[in-house]
Amino acid sequence: MKVVAVIAKHPGSGQTTVLVNLASGLVHQGYQVLIGELGKSKKLRNWLGITSEQNQATGMNIPVTPILSSLLGIDLLPLVSEPDYLTDLQEQDYDFLLLHPASNEYYNFADTPVASTIICTDLSHDNELDELQTLEKCLQSLGNDGIDLILPNKINTKEWEQNTQQLFTLADYFGYEKIADPIPH
Protein backbone atom coordinates (compact mmCIF):
# COMPACT_ATOMS: atom_id res chain seq x y z
CA MET A 1 0.00 0.00 0.00
CA LYS A 2 1.36 3.40 -1.00
CA VAL A 3 0.92 6.18 1.57
CA VAL A 4 0.52 9.78 0.38
CA ALA A 5 0.18 12.74 2.77
CA VAL A 6 -1.64 15.87 1.59
CA ILE A 7 -0.79 18.75 3.93
CA ALA A 8 -1.76 22.41 4.13
CA LYS A 9 -0.07 25.00 6.31
CA HIS A 10 -3.03 27.40 6.08
CA PRO A 11 -6.80 26.78 6.16
CA GLY A 12 -8.45 27.21 2.77
CA SER A 13 -5.36 26.22 0.79
CA GLY A 14 -7.15 23.39 -1.03
CA GLN A 15 -6.00 20.39 1.00
CA THR A 16 -9.38 18.66 1.17
CA THR A 17 -10.25 19.48 -2.45
CA VAL A 18 -6.93 18.10 -3.70
CA LEU A 19 -7.17 15.01 -1.51
CA VAL A 20 -10.72 14.09 -2.59
CA ASN A 21 -9.95 14.73 -6.26
CA LEU A 22 -6.78 12.64 -6.05
CA ALA A 23 -8.70 9.85 -4.33
CA SER A 24 -11.52 10.02 -6.90
CA GLY A 25 -9.05 9.89 -9.78
CA LEU A 26 -7.33 6.85 -8.29
CA VAL A 27 -10.68 5.11 -7.73
CA HIS A 28 -11.68 5.81 -11.34
CA GLN A 29 -8.43 4.15 -12.44
CA GLY A 30 -9.45 1.02 -10.52
CA TYR A 31 -7.43 1.46 -7.33
CA GLN A 32 -8.75 0.78 -3.83
CA VAL A 33 -8.33 4.01 -1.85
CA LEU A 34 -8.55 4.72 1.86
CA ILE A 35 -8.32 8.19 3.35
CA GLY A 36 -6.77 8.37 6.81
CA GLU A 37 -8.50 11.25 8.56
CA LEU A 38 -6.14 12.73 11.15
CA GLY A 39 -8.48 14.88 13.19
CA LYS A 40 -12.17 14.96 12.35
CA SER A 41 -12.91 17.06 9.27
CA LYS A 42 -16.52 17.99 8.62
CA LYS A 43 -15.54 19.33 5.19
CA LEU A 44 -13.90 16.04 4.19
CA ARG A 45 -16.89 14.04 5.37
CA ASN A 46 -19.24 16.34 3.44
CA TRP A 47 -17.18 15.88 0.26
CA LEU A 48 -17.38 12.11 0.70
CA GLY A 49 -21.05 12.15 1.66
CA ILE A 50 -20.36 10.44 4.98
CA THR A 51 -22.80 11.51 7.65
CA SER A 52 -22.72 8.69 10.17
CA GLU A 53 -20.11 6.66 12.02
CA GLN A 54 -22.47 3.71 11.45
CA ASN A 55 -21.65 3.47 7.73
CA GLN A 56 -18.87 0.88 8.05
CA ALA A 57 -17.25 -0.63 4.99
CA THR A 58 -17.97 -4.32 4.63
CA GLY A 59 -15.32 -6.94 5.23
CA MET A 60 -12.97 -4.68 7.17
CA ASN A 61 -11.38 -6.13 10.27
CA ILE A 62 -10.28 -3.12 12.31
CA PRO A 63 -12.12 -3.39 15.61
CA VAL A 64 -11.14 -0.13 17.33
CA THR A 65 -11.66 2.37 14.53
CA PRO A 66 -14.31 1.59 11.93
CA ILE A 67 -13.70 2.20 8.25
CA LEU A 68 -16.49 4.28 6.75
CA SER A 69 -17.70 3.88 3.16
CA SER A 70 -18.60 6.71 0.83
CA LEU A 71 -20.76 6.76 -2.27
CA LEU A 72 -17.65 7.80 -4.24
CA GLY A 73 -16.04 4.40 -3.63
CA ILE A 74 -13.49 5.95 -1.28
CA ASP A 75 -13.24 4.61 2.26
CA LEU A 76 -12.47 6.77 5.29
CA LEU A 77 -10.54 5.70 8.37
CA PRO A 78 -10.85 8.15 11.28
CA LEU A 79 -7.45 8.12 12.99
CA VAL A 80 -8.05 9.49 16.45
CA SER A 81 -5.30 7.89 18.52
CA GLU A 82 -1.72 6.72 18.18
CA PRO A 83 -1.80 4.31 15.26
CA ASP A 84 -1.16 0.66 15.21
CA TYR A 85 -3.41 0.72 12.18
CA LEU A 86 -0.86 0.06 9.42
CA THR A 87 -0.37 -3.54 10.50
CA ASP A 88 -4.13 -4.13 10.24
CA LEU A 89 -4.38 -2.23 6.95
CA GLN A 90 -1.64 -4.26 5.29
CA GLU A 91 -4.06 -7.20 5.40
CA GLN A 92 -6.68 -5.19 3.48
CA ASP A 93 -6.73 -4.74 -0.28
CA TYR A 94 -6.04 -1.00 -0.39
CA ASP A 95 -3.64 0.29 -3.00
CA PHE A 96 -3.40 3.79 -1.52
CA LEU A 97 -3.73 5.36 1.91
CA LEU A 98 -4.12 9.13 1.59
CA LEU A 99 -3.45 10.98 4.86
CA HIS A 100 -5.53 14.08 5.59
CA PRO A 101 -3.91 15.74 8.61
CA ALA A 102 -5.72 18.56 10.35
CA SER A 103 -3.29 21.23 11.55
CA ASN A 104 -0.31 19.58 13.27
CA GLU A 105 -2.00 16.17 13.60
CA TYR A 106 0.47 14.81 11.04
CA TYR A 107 3.22 14.76 13.64
CA ASN A 108 1.22 12.40 15.85
CA PHE A 109 1.59 9.76 13.14
CA ALA A 110 5.27 10.21 12.41
CA ASP A 111 5.96 6.47 12.31
CA THR A 112 3.88 6.07 9.17
CA PRO A 113 6.16 5.49 6.15
CA VAL A 114 5.03 8.08 3.60
CA ALA A 115 5.85 7.52 -0.09
CA SER A 116 4.88 11.06 -1.19
CA THR A 117 4.11 14.33 0.54
CA ILE A 118 2.01 16.95 -1.25
CA ILE A 119 1.81 20.45 0.20
CA CYS A 120 -1.04 22.82 -0.68
CA THR A 121 0.21 26.40 -0.42
CA ASP A 122 -1.22 29.85 0.01
CA LEU A 123 0.86 32.31 -2.03
CA SER A 124 -0.68 35.31 -0.31
CA HIS A 125 1.55 34.73 2.74
CA ASP A 126 4.87 36.56 2.60
CA ASN A 127 6.60 33.95 4.76
CA GLU A 128 5.50 30.88 2.77
CA LEU A 129 9.08 29.87 1.92
CA ASP A 130 10.13 30.00 5.58
CA GLU A 131 7.12 27.95 6.63
CA LEU A 132 7.70 25.31 3.94
CA GLN A 133 11.41 25.12 4.77
CA THR A 134 10.51 24.49 8.41
CA LEU A 135 7.93 21.87 7.41
CA GLU A 136 10.43 20.11 5.15
CA LYS A 137 13.02 19.96 7.95
CA CYS A 138 10.37 18.52 10.30
CA LEU A 139 9.35 15.91 7.73
CA GLN A 140 12.96 14.94 7.15
CA SER A 141 13.60 14.68 10.90
CA LEU A 142 10.71 12.18 11.03
CA GLY A 143 12.47 9.99 8.45
CA ASN A 144 10.44 11.26 5.50
CA ASP A 145 12.12 12.42 2.28
CA GLY A 146 10.50 15.81 2.69
CA ILE A 147 8.19 17.63 0.31
CA ASP A 148 7.60 15.92 -3.05
CA LEU A 149 5.13 18.33 -4.64
CA ILE A 150 4.00 21.88 -3.89
CA LEU A 151 0.55 22.86 -5.16
CA PRO A 152 -0.03 26.63 -5.26
CA ASN A 153 -3.78 26.49 -4.75
CA LYS A 154 -4.58 29.74 -3.07
CA ILE A 155 -3.36 32.89 -4.73
CA ASN A 156 -4.09 36.56 -4.36
CA THR A 157 -5.71 37.45 -7.69
CA LYS A 158 -4.99 41.16 -7.19
CA GLU A 159 -1.28 40.58 -6.63
CA TRP A 160 0.06 38.72 -9.68
CA GLU A 161 3.53 40.16 -9.14
CA GLN A 162 3.62 38.82 -5.57
CA ASN A 163 2.25 35.43 -6.70
CA THR A 164 4.90 35.17 -9.41
CA GLN A 165 7.66 36.17 -7.01
CA GLN A 166 6.45 33.61 -4.45
CA LEU A 167 6.38 30.85 -7.09
CA PHE A 168 9.90 31.66 -8.29
CA THR A 169 11.18 31.84 -4.71
CA LEU A 170 9.68 28.42 -3.91
CA ALA A 171 10.95 26.95 -7.19
CA ASP A 172 14.46 28.32 -6.65
CA TYR A 173 14.64 26.68 -3.24
CA PHE A 174 12.78 23.38 -3.77
CA GLY A 175 13.41 22.93 -7.49
CA TYR A 176 11.11 23.71 -10.39
CA GLU A 177 10.20 20.03 -10.78
CA LYS A 178 8.49 20.10 -7.36
CA ILE A 179 6.16 23.00 -8.18
CA ALA A 180 2.83 22.02 -9.73
CA ASP A 181 1.73 24.24 -12.56
CA PRO A 182 -1.31 26.19 -11.31
CA ILE A 183 -2.58 26.54 -14.88
CA PRO A 184 -3.34 23.19 -16.56
CA HIS A 185 -2.12 22.71 -20.14
Image (tube, rainbow, N blue to C red):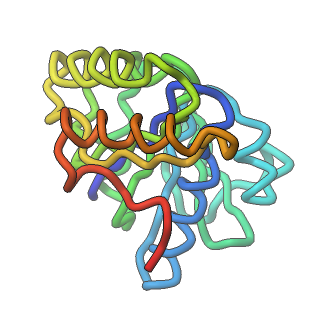
Q: At which x and y percent is residue 30?
A: 44, 84
Q: Visible in this render: residue 69?
A: yes
On screen, residue 23 above or below 77: below
On screen, residue 19 above or below 114: below
On screen, residue 89 above or below 168: below
The picture quadrant where one finds residue 109 is: top left
Q: Nearer the viewer, residue 78 or 171?
A: 171
> Number of marks in the image?
0
Q: Visible in this render: residue 88?
A: no
Give the position of the N terminus as an image quadrant: bottom left
Q: At which x and y percent is residue 105?
A: 50, 20
> Residue at the spot x=75%, y=47% of the render?
45
Q: Classify residue 108 as left or right of residue 90.
A: right
Q: Classify residue 67 as left or right of residue 139.
A: right
> Residue at the spot x=38%, y=17% of the render?
131
Q: At which x and y percent is residue 159?
A: 61, 38
Residue extending farthest to the bottom is 29
> Residue at the spot x=38%, y=42% of the render?
167
Give the position of the C terminus as an image quadrant: bottom left
Q: Nearer the viewer, residue 145 or 92?
A: 145
The picture quadrant where one finds residue 86 is: top left
